[in-house]
Image (cartoon, rainbow, N blue to C red):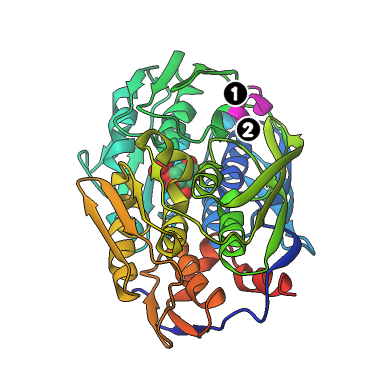
């Protein structure tokens, strides 16, 4: 059941000004938890995001026999060890694994479980139970895993893996890092080289992190491979800040007069920073500076300043994967910009925590902004000087990225708005509102 509680979001009491760190990257945190659970020995993790989605992955690996001793730090992150099951494999849990709202947990877990002959029922909440899973089960079945029901499009599903996995070369129908990761994780235990080829580049955290666990990967422009079988060993992983969370602060700074924000220690992996390229194309004053790397993941500072006169732009289809989770907040920026912004080939938005394509169109219409789709392309006709009517009620539709995007209408505007079901921000950025408050000068 989606939450119908209304949260009032008041306009910020000034400009956004100063430096801040955002919580750990969600994609990297999930991978650190799952890969550590697969490994032999105890891995040490620093900066893990403490959010509802990552908790779903932590609970899942605990149910499967990994020993987790992560503790909450004063900065809100999780730090500590995970002792994996290694060559002994996971233990069959006595009940289902509930992935709740977390698509990354459910899909990556299917790859984690594929090499083991235990039966695991995987479930999710109402939203996750509507999201497509065939894209994951199909290649895993080619490798030898089985699922009950066999042709299930959605959760719940019971997976039974096999120790005799076949390595495959898979032509992925969509650019999805979740799909790519599930197949590569199964490939860790398959005999030979498992390769995933993609229509365009998706985030590459798996290819970058697996070698830390002793699993060799090779990666090219739209291809990634792993050679198995190999038992991952323990690793030390430090998780940089999440660029998808930083995007709300940077977009708000670009729109709120007088603002100048620096987000520090944030991942600058180019497979994730497409939103910055888009903001630049719109004329926004945004810059990045690399200050270090966590393993092979570059991190640094993203700066964003108020920029009057933003204009629309076109985002090509092959760049969408690098900003897929930022389309809602970029559509809000586009709604304030002069002219039309076109996001090409955003079909994947229909398969997220909600149908984000429809949600963007419906919600921008609510504030008088024309947005529409033609085929799989999204168009937004901006209105410079856009003022949101006081008391507008926005619906998060159970989707954290929508909740935070609609909240920006209140935070950067002049009148309070209300967001229905705002609490779902817990999925990725529980301290979203307090971080905004800390930056107000
Ligand atoms: C993710 C990949 C993306 C993204 C999701 C996290 C990941 O999904 O939208 O929030 O961690 O691999 P897809 O792989 O389905 O595009």
Question: The C terminus lies in which quarter of the figure?
Answer: bottom right
Q: How many marks?
A: 2
Q: Going 46% across and 55% down the picture, which residue do you hit?
A: 330
- Residue 411, quarter of the rendered image: bottom right
**Neighbour class for label 2 at 10 Å: few (<14), some, many (≥20)?**
many
Position of 396 with respect to 266 (left or right) is: left
Of the numbered discs 2 and 1, the one sitting upstream in the chain is 2
Q: Is residue 346 magenta?
A: no
On screen, residue 219 above or below 250: above
- Residue 201, quarter of the rendered image: top left
Q: Position of residue 96 (x, y in %)?
A: 40, 54
Residue 155 in view of the camera? no
Q: Position of residue 121 (x, y in %)?
A: 36, 49
Q: Going 49% across and 50% down the picture, which residue do you hit?
A: 282
Position of 306 with respect to 146 (left or right) is: right
Residue that mark 1 sits on? 231
Q: Position of residue 210 (x, y in %)?
A: 60, 28
Indicate which quadrant contains ligand 1. top left
Residue interval drawn in magenta = 208-214
Camera-side residue: 210 or 436? 436
Q: Main secondary structure of the magenta part?
A: helix
On screen, residue 372 above or below 266: below
On screen, residue 183 above or below 48: above
Residue that mark 2 sits on? 39
């Amino acid at each position: 059941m989606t939450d119908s509680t209304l949260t009032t979001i008041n306009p910020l009491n000034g400009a956004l000004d100063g430096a801040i760190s955002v919580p750990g990257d969600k994609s990297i945190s999930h991978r650190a938890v799952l890969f550590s659970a697969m490994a032999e020995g105890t891995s040490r993790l620093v900066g893990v995001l403490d959010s509802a989605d990552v908790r779903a992955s932590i609970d899942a690996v605990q149910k499967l026999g990994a020993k987790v001793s992560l503790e909450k730090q004063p900065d809100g992150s999780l730090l500590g060890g995970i002792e994996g099951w290694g060559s002994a494999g996971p233990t069959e849990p006595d009940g289902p694994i509930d992935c709740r709202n977390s698509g990354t947990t459910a899909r990556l877990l299917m790859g984690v479980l594929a090499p083991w002959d235990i039966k695991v029922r995987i479930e999710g909440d109402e939203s996750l139970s509507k999201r497509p899973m065939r894209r994951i089960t199909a290649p895993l079945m080619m490798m030898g895993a089985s699922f009950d029901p066999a042709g299930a499009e959605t959760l719940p599903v019971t997976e039974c893996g096999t120790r005799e996995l076949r390595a495959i070369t898979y032509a992925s129908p969509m650019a999805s890092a979740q799909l790519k990761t599930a197949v590569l994780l199964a490939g860790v235990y398959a005999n030979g080289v498992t390769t995933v080829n993609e229509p365009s580049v998706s985030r590459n955290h798996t290819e970058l992190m697996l070698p830390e666990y002793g699993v060799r990967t090779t990666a090219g422009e739209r291809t990634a491979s792993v050679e198995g079988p190999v038992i991952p060993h323990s690793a030390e992983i430090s998780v940089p800040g999440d660029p998808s969370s930083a995007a709300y602060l940077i977009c708000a700074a670009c729109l709120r007069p007088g603002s100048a924000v620096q987000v520090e220690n944030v991942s600058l992996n180019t497979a994730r920073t497409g939103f910055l390229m888009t903001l630049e194309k719109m004329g926004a004053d945004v810059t990045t500076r690399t200050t270090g790397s966590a393993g092979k993941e570059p991190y640094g500072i993203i700066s964003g300043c108020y920029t009057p006169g933003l204009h629309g732009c076109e985002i090509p289809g092959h760049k969408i994967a690098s900003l897929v989770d930022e389309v809602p907040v970029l559509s809000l920026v586009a709604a304030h910009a002069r002219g039309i912004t076109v996001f090409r080939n955003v079909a994947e938005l229909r398969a997220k925590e909600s149908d984000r394509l429809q949600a963007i169109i419906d919600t921008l219409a609510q504030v008088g902004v024309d947005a529409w789709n033609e085929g799989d392309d999204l168009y937004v006709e901006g209105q410079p000087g856009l003022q949101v009517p006081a008391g507008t009620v926005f619906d998060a539709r159970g989707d954290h990225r929508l909740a935070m995007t609609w909240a920006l209408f209140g935070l950067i505007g002049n009148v309070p708005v209300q967001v229905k079901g705002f609490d779902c921000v817990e999925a990725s950025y529980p301290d979203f509102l307090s971080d905004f408050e800390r930056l107000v000068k």
